[in-house]
Amino acid sequence: MTDPVVDLLVLGSGIAGLSAAVRAAREHGLDVGVVTKGSLSDAATRWAQGGVAAVVDEVSDSTELHVADTLSVGAGLCDVDAVRTMVAEGPARVGELIAWGARFDRDAEGALSLGREGGHSASRVVHAGGAATGAEIERVLVDTVRATAAAVHEHVFAVDLVVDGGRCCGVRVRHADGSVGTLAARNVLLATGGAGQLYSVTTNPLEATGDGIAMALRAGVACADLEFVQFHPTALAVDRHPRPLITEALRGDGAVLRDSAGERFVDELSARDVVSRAMTQRMLELGVAHLWLDCTDVDDLAGRYPTIAAMLANAGLDPTVDWLPVAPAAHYLCGGVITDLDGATTMAGLWAAGEVACSGVHGANRLASNSLLEGLVFGTRAAAAVAAGRNGPSPTGAMAGVLGSGGDFGSLPVEVVGTGVAGCDPSMRASLQRAMTEGAGVVRDEGSLAVVAGVLDEVAATPGDGSVAALEVANLAAVGSALVAAARRRTESRGAHTRIDAPDLDGEQARRVVCRRVDGGAEPFDVATVGGAG
């Protein structure tokens, strides 16, 4: 089955993809298609409790402060130009959401209520419904996309990129009835989110299987910073997959972390990697599976955070009297498909925005609530670049180091790049997740990473049944293998990457680890360090 060629085919229905789709159709008059493997509203954006970090109050905050906070948390690997672009354009993008109908929390005077989260030096986080920001943004974007001329393909799984003459010109897809076809496009935007389902303990929805990154890797497109997996410190430690998330905003409002003896052991408003590391170390010392979040001093929690209160009530917990069992959970992939400042990748016709991308804004660790902001800003920029007829990347953002490295990170010379229709055995998903959690989690070392690599090789070598579940496991294995290869190359501890056999920061390794797929040879990935922080 071949559909008409569209100007822009967006893969994914989160904040980055839908922002791009709206802009491309409404403002630039492009023919747009949106592909999502679930329904249009089934995206990680919907799960986001944290808000959008943006400088909307120039009296108590400033662009320079937001930039400085982002660079500090990124541990020397942020691209400065990318960060400045995101921070400078963020307030306007938030204003557009409001114009489209987003209802953010406001104070008694009608001004936007601004929260403070870990790593921020000022209150600049815009929320909706206390901890329901993602759901509100998703609602607005879905409604707006449905009101445009965009063709929406729901319950369609993107299998692999179609490449012709080194240019991406569409995707091979699997429809809900099992049939396989092609969606042709002059440009394809990867906005497929992250890969939290690599881990058995994660806050990510079941759909977060790294599909876009895996497709890019198979097509020889350069990816970077995959070793930096951010773990959210306060996932509710209950027997659920994914784990319910307890927003960081509660710690900004006075909630504190305690160990089993009731002692505080970390500054709760430190960056997420610092808090997660401290929690993991304390859990290992005490031999326990979780610690405690004490919210008893948070004023009017139920009124200000109704979705959190309802979730806790469902779990039989009363935050006014109970300490809440919490443990770190895989939350956000800081790296992905390398892009320039307009979302262009190393393959002509292929663009990326949001969590699937490595734009350079997060570096080694993401500043809280910068993720929704990144999706808004760079999804919008990608749409504008496509409309302007851009063809290929410029040496800006994270792409600057790659284009200046002299390395060949171009596409493989094939028409359709893929791994066949079988995928990998779906029953191996749980063993893959356990191996990643135990050996490539908050802390790792060469020995643990080698064990994980062996498990991933076994998974990749076990054919599946061609189902979507089998294709997802194949994608997890591909992304996991690249992640582990990058983590083995980075022999230091930096940001969200902590190696207990290399605990110090190494200034010589303040460069990106870039992976691309290669055929043949003993190693599945060509791994190199290129460039540096802008």
Image (tube, rainbow, N blue to C red):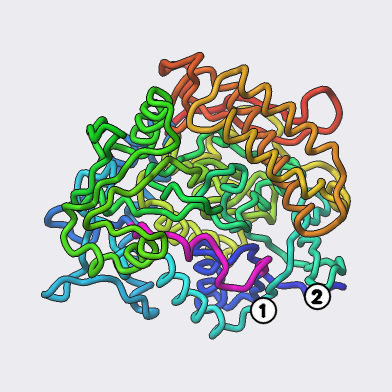
2 or 1: tag closer to the N-terminus: 2
Q: Position of residue 3 (x, y in %)?
A: 80, 75
Q: Which residues are magenta?
A: 35-52
Q: Position of residue 226 (x, y in %)?
A: 57, 36
Mark 2 neighbour class, 10 Å CA radius: few under 14, some 14 to 19, many 20 or more: few
Q: Quadrant of the N terminus?
A: bottom right
Residue 3 tag number: 2
C-alpha span from label 2 to label 1: 10 Å
From what the image shows, is residue 137 above or below residue 499? below
Mark 1 neighbour class, 10 Å CA radius: few under 14, some 14 to 19, many 20 or more: some
Q: Is residue 74 visible?
A: no
Q: Amino acid at mark 1?
A: Ala
Q: Residue at x 36, y 57 (%)?
A: 50
Question: Cβ–Cβ below 8 Å for labels 2 and 1?
Answer: yes
Q: Amino acid at mark 2?
A: Asp
What secondary structure prevails in the magenta region? loop
- Residue 38 lies in the magenta stretch: yes
Q: Secondary structure at mark 1?
A: strand
Q: Quadrant of residue 82?
A: top left
- Residue 255 lies in the magenta stretch: no
Q: Position of residue 176 (x, y in %)?
A: 78, 71
Q: Quadrant of the C terminus?
A: top left
Q: Residue at x 56, y 82 (%)?
A: 146
Left or right: where does residue 60 sit relative to residue 376? left
Q: Residue at x 44, y 47 (%)?
A: 237
Q: Residue at x 74, y 63 (%)?
A: 157
Q: Position of residue 482 (x, y in %)?
A: 67, 34
Q: Which residue is tagged 1?
A: 151
Left or right: where does residue 432 sit relative to residue 22? right
Residue 433 tag number: none
Taking depth in this image into account, of 142 and 131 the one nearest to the observer is: 131
Q: Secondary structure at mark 2?
A: strand
